[in-house]
Amino acid sequence: MIRGEISEAIPRRILVTNRAISDKTETDKKFLWFKTGVSVSHAYNRELLSLLWRFVEKTGVALELILFDEDGMTDLEALQQLEAFGTTPINYGRTYETLDDLLEDLPYRPEVLGVVDLREYSWRYGGWYVGPAYFDRVL
């Protein structure tokens, strides 16, 4: 709140990529020995979601789910899957075409404290990268 104006308040948030909290598995659909298609399923990492939940409860920071077009779903579908999965600390969602689009957007988002992603992408984020070890220190 700035000078009593509540419309100006932007919650601090940490961005969480879908690939950080889920394991994407692709299985081939077959009829006899012919490949008829590919089915994609996401298995969510309960341990990391629990860690994020405790972090949100303690600090009050909001979490935003980040999806890329390669994930094959919209942010609304992913948030609905997480809600059906159980309690989720993630309140917001956004879809980017590529990782480069997210990296171009980060400097213009002052409310973002960091990005949770897989360790192999940490070098792309620089100072915005937040790994699971960060949450252990805070809790």
Image (tube, rainbow, N blue to C red):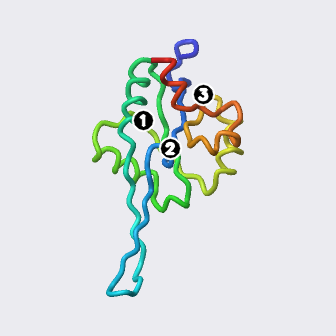
Disc 2 element = helix
The structure residue drawn at horizontal position 28% and vertical position 47%, both measured from the top left corner, is: 84
Q: Quadrant of the C terminus?
A: top left
Which label sits in the foreground, 3 or 2?
2
Marks 1 and 2 in Cβ contact (< 8 Å): yes
| Residue type at numbered disc 1 | Leu
Contact, CB < 8 Å: mark 3 with mark 2? no
Nearest the eye: 62 or 8: 62
| In the image, residue 65 above or below residue 3 | below
Q: Which label was assigned to residue 135? A: none
Disc on the earlier residue, 1 or 2: 2
Q: Residues within 10 Å of mark 3 (few under 14, many from 20)?
A: some
Q: Position of residue 85 (x, y in %)?
A: 29, 45
Q: Residue furthest top?
A: 3
Q: Residue at x 47, y 33 (%)?
A: 63
Mark 2: few, some, or many residues within 10 Å (few <14, many ≥20)? many
- Image point (53%, 23%), residue name: 9
Find disc 1 in the rendering and name its residue: 48
- Label disc, if present, on residue 20 of the rendered structure: 2
Residue 106, position as x, y percentages in the image: 67, 38
Amino acid marked by disc 3: Leu
